[in-house]
Amino acid sequence: MSRRALLAAGTAAAALTPVPAMAGEAGGRRLRTGFERLAEGGYAQLRGQRTGIVTNPTGVTRDVRHIVDVMHADDHVDLIAVFGPEHGFRGTAQAGGSEGRYDDPATGLPVYDTYLKSGQPLADIFTASGVDTVVFDIQDVGARFYTYIWTLYDCMEAAQLAGKRFVVLDRPNPVTGRAAQGPVLHKEFATFVGRQPIAQAHGMTVTELARLFNGEFLAKPVELETVLMSGWKRSEFYDASGLPWVPPSPNMPTPDTALVYSGTCLFEATNLSEGRGTTRPFELLGAEGVDGRWAREAGRLGLPGVHFREAYFAPTFSKFQGKTIGGVQIHVHDRAAYDPVRTGIGLLVTAKKVWSGFTWRSDNWIDKLTGSTRVRSMIDAGATTDEVVAAWQDELSAFRQVRKEYLLY
């Protein structure tokens, strides 16, 4: 049996164990998260294990209690440590920040900082914490450059180095688990916004990604167990889940933000505002000197499922703070037809066409976000939206084939 098949069989076995439907649930259809199923089973997967958990404010029950508080109060689990990612365990830090090492006032548990830590230094943190098992439970948003999935990857690698078990609790991909979209990262562009060659919009849940990482990318696989959701369908958006939305980061306020993010986050790599400092980050885009021509030009592309409105706004922080700027607001009217990555490329192409002030960030951040020099070089050379999108189809097709082997729903 191949390594890939062996890992798939081994990690899926416990995760697919049926859990009886709760009273009042028609056919067990109500979605239950990995944490809910873990707790319903009396934390059987953690029995006899000193446990640490990698989580943030999204690690909540459906009545919005934090799972760390719930686990700390339950005698069935020995929770001894918490590990915080970017933005921190309690979510107080902005982009590019974390909360550092401290003791959690609510539980007294030690909180360790994982942000920008990997390999042996992170393994040393796991060892120092005294845990036997590391649990991961964070709400992802489905984009390669959202850093929590690379915290997952780094923690899996570090757990293997430290000889720890690793348990991943699943939550919905809020923008569905449909086919992957967008360019695939080239390894020479690997950073914390993309460690490994996956598509820009991966269309996977965190348990599926964990199995993919273990089977394809880690030099040595970690001892991995996954606890799946029940009642989730790949075609469903977050509002079908019945779960509360807790912003996974300060500029991800709603599931609508997540819907557009895998495309419009590319504007971080330009001198235009990506909407930070507004109530609609990543849906509002603009700059000084941009006017209604952009919305009209973008509308002419005929992109599926989306309209573009001429918009004017004044960011309260970040780019153009306190200045009134012009641009567009994205209005998605058909989520099933909408392609966020194609839309993001179309907006870059048209912004460069109608605004003479358009520039890329000097550090070529666009190459890190898209995973190669191709998007930047093609747009600079005057390529159309369709030409740019066509250029990554072969590598995307190859990724989709690999991805199939790790899908669980």
Image (cartoon, grey):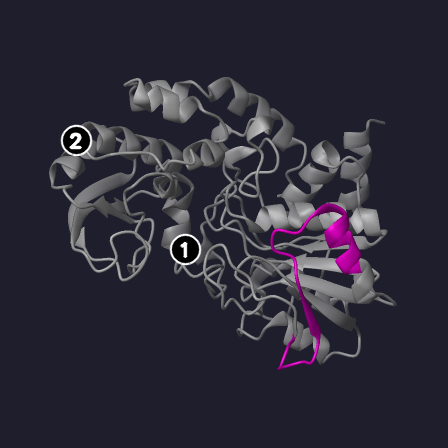
Q: Position of residue 89 (x, y in %)?
A: 59, 66
> Type of residue at label 2?
Val
Vertically, is 176 above or below 179? Answer: below
Name the image quarter holding residue 23.
bottom right
**Circle 1 sits on which residue?**
255
- Foreground: disc 2 or disc 1: 2
Residue at the (40%, 25%) spot, across then down: 375
Q: Amino acid at mark 1?
A: Pro
Residue 234 x %, y %: 53, 44
Query: Taking 49 as reference, is 326 left or right?
Result: left
Question: Residue 132 falls in which quadrant of the image?
Answer: bottom right
- What is the tally of numbered marks visible in this picture? 2
Magenta stretch bounds: 103-126
Q: How far from the left and from the top, in percent, is residue 402? A: 64, 28
> Disc 2 on helix, strand or loop?
helix
Q: Which residue is mark 2?
A: 354
Furthest residue in direction right, as rendered: 48
Residue 65 image position (x, y, % from top left): 57, 75
